[in-house]
Image (cartoon, rainbow, N blue to C red):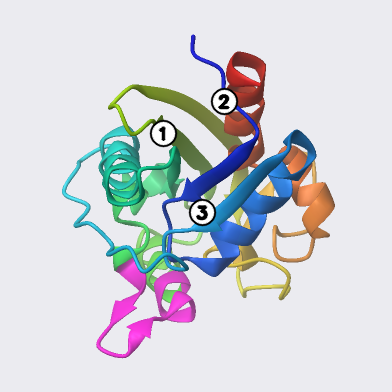
Amino acid sequence: MRKLQPGPLVIASHNQGKVREIRALLAPFGIEPVSAGDLGLPEPEETGTTFAENALIKARASAEGSGIVALADDSGLCVDALGGAPGVYTADWAETPEGRDWGLAMRKVEDRLEALGSDVDRSAHFACTLALCWPDGETALFEGQVAGHLTWPPRGDLGFGYDPVFVPEGHDQTFAEIEPEKKHAISHRAEAFRELVNALL
């Protein structure tokens, strides 16, 4: 498999929390990440029905728009009792006319769980697919997951997205209460990154 060389790399995201996390994971390898937002690249419509399809859509758009190798992440919260929802529609559950409201998204998940009864299974996992795309069209995919359960009310202010309601397996703190360095070591994104590093770096 083709290796990833030190130098510039576009992170195909306009989500600053995600960009910060990816930048920290890439820092030791001489990679110089710049976000699609910083380059003024438009956000492509995510029309895929899987994390892999959406990650590839974003990576291809950024690689073609910039002429630089691009890395995209598509990730989401999958709740067992909700049939895997919100899944690939994780961000959609937060959409409002004024922008994304993650408090609203967490409330939607909780309301659906509560509707299933007090003894509902609160198991969930975060899934992540990383897609790397070179300007000549070559692509590579890497996947990671972290299992856990949902808690309510939300706790912590260190994370983003659904982090304040997700407690990873083997821990008693939410992702939003765990220090970022520690979260980076155990997250779904970190697992996908280990796969990428082992294969390409």
Report if residue 100 lies within the magenta region: yes
Q: Amino acid at mark 3?
A: Asp
Residue for badge 2: 4
Q: Which residues are magenta?
A: 93-106
Residue 32 versus residue 52 in the image, above or below:
below
Residue for badge 1: 131
Q: Amino acid at mark 1?
A: Ala
Q: What residue sits 41% from the left and 80% below the top?
A: 104
Which tag, 1 or 2, sits closer to the chain's start? 2
Q: Label 3: how many residues lie within 10 Å, few (<14), some (14-19) or many (20+)?
A: few
The label nearer to you, 3 versus 2, is: 2
The label nearer to you, 1 versus 3, is: 1
**Disc 1 from disc 2: Cα separation:** 13 Å
Q: The residue tagged with tag 3: helix, strand or loop?
A: loop
Report if residue 103 lies within the magenta region: yes
Which tag, 3 or 2, sits closer to the chain's start? 2
Where is residue 81 drawn, in percent x and y? 39, 46
Residue 97 position by quadrant:
bottom left
**Disc 3 from disc 2: Cα separation:** 47 Å
Q: Amino acid at mark 2?
A: Leu
Q: Are marks 1 and 3 in contact (CB under 8 Å)?
A: no
Residue for badge 3: 119
Where is residue 172 drawn, in percent x and y? 80, 53
Give the farthest residue toward the top: 1
